Image (cartoon, coloured by chain):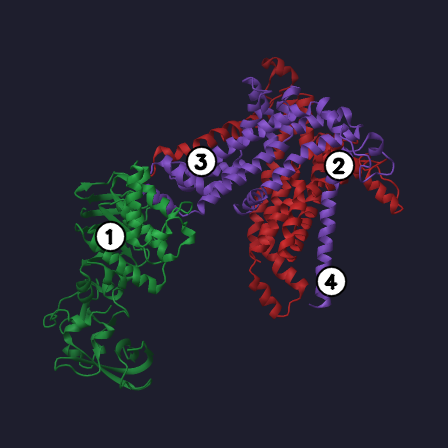
Amino acid sequence: MAALEIEHVEKTLRSGQSVLRDVSFTARDGELLAVVGPSGCGKSTLLRLVAGLDSITAGVIRIGGRTVNEVPPQQRDVAMVFQNHALYPHMTVYENLAFGLRVRGTPRTQIDRRVRQTAAQLGLEAMLKRYPRELSGGQRQRTALGRAMLRNPALFLLDEPLSSLDVPLRAELRRELAALHRSLGTTMVYVTHDQSEALSLGQRMVVLAGGRVQQIDTPINVYHRPANRFVAGFVGWPPMNFLTAESFDDGARVPAGASGLEYGVRPESFSTQAGGPDDLQLAGRIERIESQGSECHIELTQRFGRVLARLRCEKLPRVGEQIRLWVRRSDLHAFDRTNGQRVELMGLERSGPRPEERTQ
Amino acid sequence: MSLQNRTLRAGTYLGLAVLAGATLFPLLWVTSIALMRAPEAAAGTPSLWPHHPTLVNVINIISRQHLGRYFFNSLVVAIATMALSMLVAGSAGYGLARVEFRGRRMVSWLVMLGVLIPNQALVLPLFEMFRTVHLVNHYAALVLPAAANPVGIVLVQAYMRAIPADILDAARIDGASEWRIYRSIVVPLMAPMLAAVGVLIFVVSWNDFMWPMIAMQQESMQTLPVALAAIDREHYQDIGLMAAGATMTMLPMVFVFLASQRYYLRSVIAGSLTD
Amino acid sequence: MMRKRPSGALFVLPALVLLAVFVFIPLIGVFGLSLTDFDVYSVANPANLHVIGAANYWHLLRDRQAWQALETTLVVVVVGVPATLLLSLISALMIESIAERWRGLFRTALFVPVVCSTVAIAISWRYLLNTRFGLVNHLLGLLGLRAVDWLGSPHLAILAITIVVVWKGFGYGMIIVSAARKEIPDELYDAARIEGAGVPHRLLRITVPMLAPTLGLLALLDVSGYWQLFAEPYVLTQGGPLGSTTSLLLLMYERGFRWWRWGAASAIAMALTAVMWLFAWVQRHTRAGWRGD
């Protein structure tokens, strides 16, 4: 077990294209850290750098306190689970699991014992003689996980391990993975493009975009106090609305520096009734109602743009009619127009996250 | 099915049957002649079938013309060329497709250029080279140039590119050395294409003519096609004898092809896709 | 890069050495030789060797034998390649249109000549084409036609050789076209049928344009193969009658290994190589147009 420390890591390709710029963060010992970002943000590159599959341009990577910049992958004591499993197609499940131990010259009896033990842990005992092509998607993923576990590494690297699975299976394996992490207690770095996966799985999350770290915090804090406009828009689904002061009926009541600020409101922060005297109001014509079952996504148009609200479906006006919505002042996020950074406004301090607000 | 469709289909089968007949007939006929005695083989009204089959031509060409010796030479050269080509093409194809090193693009480009050089145009300096090192009339004179076959490298390279690099990275993280990765992961993965390249080169080597004729001046070192052409210059009047020689030169490759058709055709098809 | 270790180059090294020694150095060698008067006297004593610049090439331009060899080779390419392509295309389309279980049989049958030794094939065909007891003439006789001296008359000999070359070669293209035909999605044909396109239309508007890139590549393969014509005339006609079937490569071989005029032979080899590069260049630059269909 070990912490992973990334300090001022840069990665520039031979073509001169910069993939990662001054990336720094730490995955604490035993932590499950989710790295999330849109495709092309450099998150997979980051994982490959940690694994030692590619070399860094500048900076320091430490695993368990040891600087590993020049250490080849097999000596870094890391295990990696790849997006499309990367199982050896010409080996059975057993051989796939055993390969890493075999190349290290582990005694045969010990290999056998550990392979069987891990297979049992993952429910793969019956599959040991099969080839990867004879497995279902979930079984392949479990095999890939097992291969990583068998090595008993100091650090697990998971590169979008669930993205090739269908949705119900993904949820199931996500739970299994969380349970596995608890029982193994090993540090895990989990890369994903799916913000909901990062929110639900990570103990903390790193939001990466354009090769830069945007925010590092617990999922709850990232969700409720996004560090900038990008994070605010990227994390949470459906995405946050960005409004100007004029969008509100009483724009004058929106605090300070209104011209230089942009306001973010999450779709679920709207309500059809006033909660308190301080609430802000906003009105618009309903353009579209999309039922999600228990809730409805309401799209309304205003003079200043479109707004998406997530509301209970009962007693809603019909499409084409006017609707009036209220937002608590503490649910308003403010961002500087020039640099997109979060601005903490006087009188807008949040009372802290309300548990029922959490999506997922 | 409409009448028109049925006619079309019948016509297709008929056309194919005629084409297949025209393709196979010369080969079957020469085999048939090989089993005829001289008068029947040279009869004014050609005989399609040996009415009094005999092995005399086969026996003659083996005993008097030492066909066994040439057969042995061809076999040695073809097997050695195949083995060396597979070793060379396998490692180079993998190296060019999946290992980073300085100058990789340059080497890739050189290999592609190699494909475009007609190797029969190189026989003059090649002969001079082998003469200088006294390797004319040695198997090496046939095996080494034939193993420098860029087509095999290109085929393996293209095949390796289709294999996800993640698998190799997984092995790297699993702790395997470069050599171990090559032996335990890469070779098994590219085995189908390697087999295809092997069969292709085996057949090409067996049938090669111009360079073996130049490089093997000593009769006892000649390969089958070279010896056959030489015997032909002297005995072309002996139809049965030459037919037996031709048949015995072709038949082994027909059998090799029939036995390894899957691999052989794979290399043909892949060759048209790698461009 | 972490993986940029010497091991990468080691994988490629054997191939590189072989290619350098047996392809690239000889290529430079041919070029070098073509600038000299290397002949039988130089073999005995290198002191007799002189660099004569482009003289061999100038001689070549005024050499009637060379022009005739060029003409012979071009005839085989110009007549043989389209015939081969057409046969490859037709046989592949026929095979792809019949029931699955018969395809393998026909494919194998049509491919067999490809794996046979050219020398052996040429010997076989010489008997088929024999004036007195050859089967081809016998068939012509049955049809009431006169026997033809296939290999004895200049015009027919080159035709006969072209026929043998095409017969041996088309099966190769058949396999390639057949594989390419499989890649054309069935939906295209379904869509065309719904729009009312009949068999000829589907062939000309879908199949042939979709196969064009493959046929283009195949044309290059066939051209470069036929351009190196050697064993067929060597065995069938020894280049005759009257030099009418002496291909460029056969001429190079005779100048080089019968008369030991290596300088002149090397000039032919260089010209042969240069024209092949021209073919490849033309093919590469016309392909874009075909793709655009």
Element carrying mark 1: strand
Q: Identify the residue position indicated by label 1 in the image.
A: A189
Residue at the (21%, 50%) spot, across then down: A186
Chain B colour in the picture: purple
Same subunit, labels 3 and 1: the answer reads no
| Residue A64, quarter of the rendered image | top left
Q: Position of residue C227 (x, y in %)?
A: 65, 38
| Residues at marks 3 and 4, CA–CA distance in whole angstroms | 53 Å
Same subunit, labels 2 and 3: the answer reads yes
Name the amino acid type tagged 4: Thr
C102 lies above or below C274: below
Decide which of tag 3 and tag 4 comes sooner along the chain.
Answer: 4
Q: Chain of mark 2?
A: B
Using a 10 Å C-alpha cutoff, classify the residue at mark 2 as few (fewer than 14 neighbours), some (14 to 19) or many (20 or more): many
Element carrying mark 2: helix
| Residues at marks 1 and 4, CA–CA distance in whole angstroms | 67 Å
Same subunit, labels 1 and 4: the answer reads no
Decide which of tag 2 and tag 3 comes sooner along the chain.
Answer: 2
Chain A colour in the picture: green
Chain C colour in the picture: red
Q: Identify the residue position indicated by label 4 in the image.
A: B7
Q: Identify the residue position indicated by label 2 in the image.
A: B30
